[in-house]
Amino acid sequence: MDSTSNIFDPNKFTDKAINSRMTMVWTALPGIIQSFDPQALTCEVQPAIKGRMTTEKGIELVNMPLLLDCPVVFPHAGGCSLTFPIQPGDECLVVFSSRAIDFWWQLGGIQPPAEARMHDLSDGFVIPGPYSQARKISGVSTSALQIRSDDGTAFIEINPSSHNVKCQTNGDFSVQCKNFAVEASASATITSPAIALNGALTNNASTEAQMTGGLNTTKDVTASGISLKSHTHSNVQNGPGNTGGPQ
């Protein structure tokens, strides 16, 4: 076969032209975050796939240029957001817009494209989260939704089958709010080496039946320095009689 047949083959020529043009179309790439701006909510990202460059030595694989000012995609809707403390070295997926996003990013709303570019490296959105096998986490629950630390030590879990909700951490757990209410239909249990109440303690049981359990303890109770088990009464005459009940 003539060696020039491929050159003049219209199908081969079309395929080559399409492939050449497609190398300039960017859709999505894995990346490694270099920096995060928590004010602008943008990242600087190093694409994790090398590009091809034609040099005097032929085609070489080189690092692609850094992607600058890439908006971060945090799950967000209805006035609520789920954010992450993005750190350098985190892996991500960069998705490239089909049109220039400059005016939209600056002004929001519906805007014209700033330029005629399409599927360009300048218009990437950062989605934190993809894992390479080298960076993947372990111990992922297959039965419940979890919001968790990568090491699995701290998590909040919702089980769709049992409807149980569980929170676990070896750190501190704190709540700051105006009013805090807990309603348990069966029982409530607190287990701790020490419990401190910095405020008035009120029992609002509405019926005598609700009070039958009372307060039971095998330990002493002290109020204003006076022991319930070993306190004494003054101005009482010795004898077999007992003092009267509380007034």
Image (cartoon, rainbow, N blue to C red):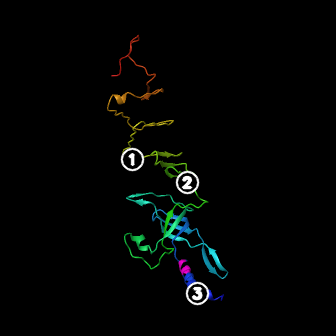
Marks 3/2: CA–CA distance: 55 Å
Marks 1/2: CA–CA distance: 28 Å
Q: Which quarter shows the N terminus?
A: bottom right
The residue nearer to you, when weighing 12 against 99, is: 12
- 166 left or right, relative to 58: left
Q: Earlier in the sequence, mark 3 or mark 2?
A: 3
| Badge 3 vs badge 2, beta-carbon distance below 8 Å | no
Instruction: Find residue 150 and name its label.
Output: 2
SS for callout 3: loop
The residue that appears at 46% across and 47% down in the rendered structure is 161
Q: Earlier in the sequence, mark 1 or mark 3?
A: 3
Range covered by the magenta-colored residues = 18-22
The residue nearer to you, when weighing 23 against 150, is: 23
Instruction: Find residue 242 and name its label.
Output: none
Few, some or many residues within 10 Å of mark 3 (<14, 14–19, 20+):
few
Few, some or many residues within 10 Å of mark 2 (<14, 14–19, 20+):
few
Instruction: Find residue 177 and name its label.
Output: 1
| Badge 1 vs badge 2, beta-carbon distance below 8 Å | no
Q: Could you say where residue 223 lies in the image, as x and y percent from the top left?
A: 42, 29
Instruction: Find residue 9 and name its label.
Output: 3
